[in-house]
Each structure stands twice: as C-alpha cells, then as structure tokens.
Amino acid sequence: MTEQEFSYKPFASQGFYQVVNKQLVEMVDFHPGQRVVDLACGTGAVTRLILEKLKGARDSLVIGIDMSATAIREAMAQLSNVKDVALELIHSRAEQLSEIVKEHVDGVVFCNGIHMVPDKTELMSEVAITLRPGGTFAFNTTFFNGAVPEESEQFYRRWMSKSIRSLKKNHDMLPSRDVEKVAARVQLSVEEYEELLAQSGFTIKRKDLCPAPMDLEGFLAISQYEAFIEGAMPGVPLELGSESLQNGARLAFEELKLKDVPRNWLSVVATRD
Ligand SMILES: C[S@@+](CC[C@H](N)C(=O)[O-])C[C@H]1O[C@@H](n2cnc3c(N)ncnc32)[C@H](O)[C@@H]1O
C-alpha cells in the first residue's frame, strides 16, 4: 500500500464537504489585491476557493501552509495550473505562522484542522500577530463538542463497536489503550472557542452551526484518511484500521437502516481588534 491511499482526497471530494467550505469562504469579504493565508491547506481544495476570490489583481497573494509534506506535494500538483494569483505552498506547522509570514496579511483561513492543534491559545496568538488590525480569521470544524446531535450518538457507538469487532474477528487485534488522546479527540465547545477568541484579541463577526448530514460514502471516505484512522484506531496499522472502520460503517448503516447521519459544522468569522 502507498501513503497516498490514506490521503484526505476521497473525503475532500465529497459534495457536502465542498458546500460547507464554500459557505465559509463566502462568509468572508475577501477581494482581489489581498494577501490571505490558508492554514492547514491540505491537498488544496479550500486554497482553490480562496484563489478564485482573489484573482484579477497583481498584488493578490495566497500562502498555503501544511505540516504534511505529502499534502503539500499533492496541493502543488492540484494547483499547478493557477495563473492569475501569486501562490506559495509551504511545508510547516501552523504554530510557526509568524516566523514564516513576516508581513501582515488581510486574512487567515483554517478549514477543518483547528481541532488537530493541541495548543489553540498559542495558535490564536500566532494568527493575531500575523493579521493586520481589522484582518479576518475564519475557521470551520466538525470536531467540536456539539457536532454530534443526540439522535446520531447511537450510530457512532454502533460504528465503533462494529469496527472493533471486525478488527478482532479478521485480524485478532484490538486498538491500543495506551496511546495518548490525539488532539482531535479533545474537543472544545462553541463557548470555549468564543472565549479563546476574545482572550486572543478577536471580535466574532459571524458564527454558524450548519447541519451537514453525512451519507455512507462520506464515512467510507473519512475511514481512508490517515489522521482519522490513527485517532479512531490507535496503534492499529493504517490498512487494517481503514478496512475495519469501513466494515463497521457499512454494518451500522445497514442495521440502523440509515440514509445519512446528521452532523453539525461550526463556522466562525472573526476580526482582529
Ligand atoms: C482535515 S485536513 C483539512 C485540509 C483543508 N484545510 C480542507 O479543509 O480541505 C487537515 C489538515 O491539517 C493539517 N494539519 C493538522 N495540524 C496541523 C498543524 N499543527 N499545522 C499545520 N497543518 C496541520 C494536516 O496535515 C491536514 O492536511
């Protein structure tokens, strides 16, 4: 198996996923001539949306940053045909933002990754240093306390128990219990994000909870993503973890006779004071 088979690409191409990201980028008033950072740009799906907003002016600049070298390589390939806007893709951690981007920017976007950052206070301070006063910080996530409505909890319990049973049955293996909780599993509530933003010198301009029901295809796609497999099946080889999570999702959908599973996306747009 190659590394690429556990990339984020299958999930990033899901229709509902593109809709929630587009909604966030539309919520921000970006325009040609601005300089915008796409933090944790992954394979470049959101970077492309930002580039579209900024094209048409010589000064426009988009800087994509991601800690995964594989993701940056993939983003370079996906965005190789970009012409009208200057684009830089940089392999680095979001926590080093102010070291990498020395001049103030007009916007920082962080889609579907903020939950993965262990120290969110440090991250927000980096974003505040890098943004010009009045600049915009926009982020979204579906890994927060409140993302899973009560009616979906039964599905998640069934999915995990079926996945673990499939791993045991087919490979005589269980996920490890000793592995430290990955950052994505320690989820903040909306109120905690609000507090953190206020403490870091931001004013919230817009905050939305968007319902985004996920179908089986979405669960099969997220089960092929390295970071998700590592979080859900700690200590299990990626190939076996992915297979078990996909088996578990199919069985849970079948047994509960589901078409999709309700889930919420949190979108926040804030400006630097
Ligand atoms: C779920 S993907 C989202 C990609 C893209 N923003 C999107 O919405 O399609 C999360 C990305 O965050 C990156 N990431 C996670 N923690 C990071 C950090 N501390 N610094 C930089 N990138 C990070 C991962 O490498 C991954 O590419």
Image (spheres, helix red, strand yellow):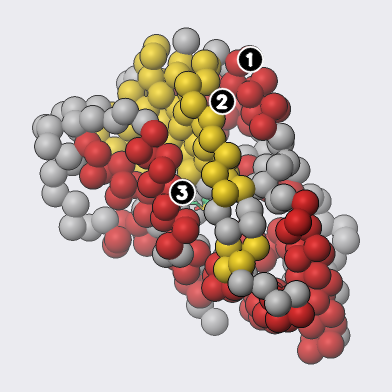
Asked if the residue under mark 2 is in contact with the one under mark 1, i.e. CB atoms within 8 Å, the reply is yes
Could you tell me which residue is drawn at 29 percent across and 62 percent down?
A: 77
The residue lying toward the viewer, choosing from 196 and 183, is 196
Which residue is labeled 3 in the image?
A: 20
Asked if the residue under mark 3 is in contact with the one under mark 1, i.e. CB atoms within 8 Å, the reply is no
Which residue is labeled 1 in the image?
A: 199
* Beta carbon of the mark 1 residue lies under 8 A of ligand 1: no
Between marks 1 and 2 in the image, the one whose residue lies nearer the viewer: 1
The residue lying toward the viewer, choosing from 196 and 240, is 196
Helix, strand or loop under label 1: helix
Helix, strand or loop under label 3: helix
The residues bearing labels 3 and 2 have C-alpha atoms spaced at a distance of: 22 Å
Q: Quadrant of residue 213?
A: bottom right
Q: Where is residue 91 in the image (x, y as percent from the top left)?
A: 43, 47
Q: Which of marks 1 and 2 is nearer the N terminus?
A: 2
Which residue is labeled 2 in the image?
A: 124
Drawn side of residue 189 relative to residue 71, left or right: right
Compared to residue 89, the image places residue 102 above or below, namely: above
Q: Where is residue 75 in the image (x, y as percent from the top left)?
A: 35, 56
Q: Where is residue 148 in the image (x, y as percent from the top left)?
A: 71, 51
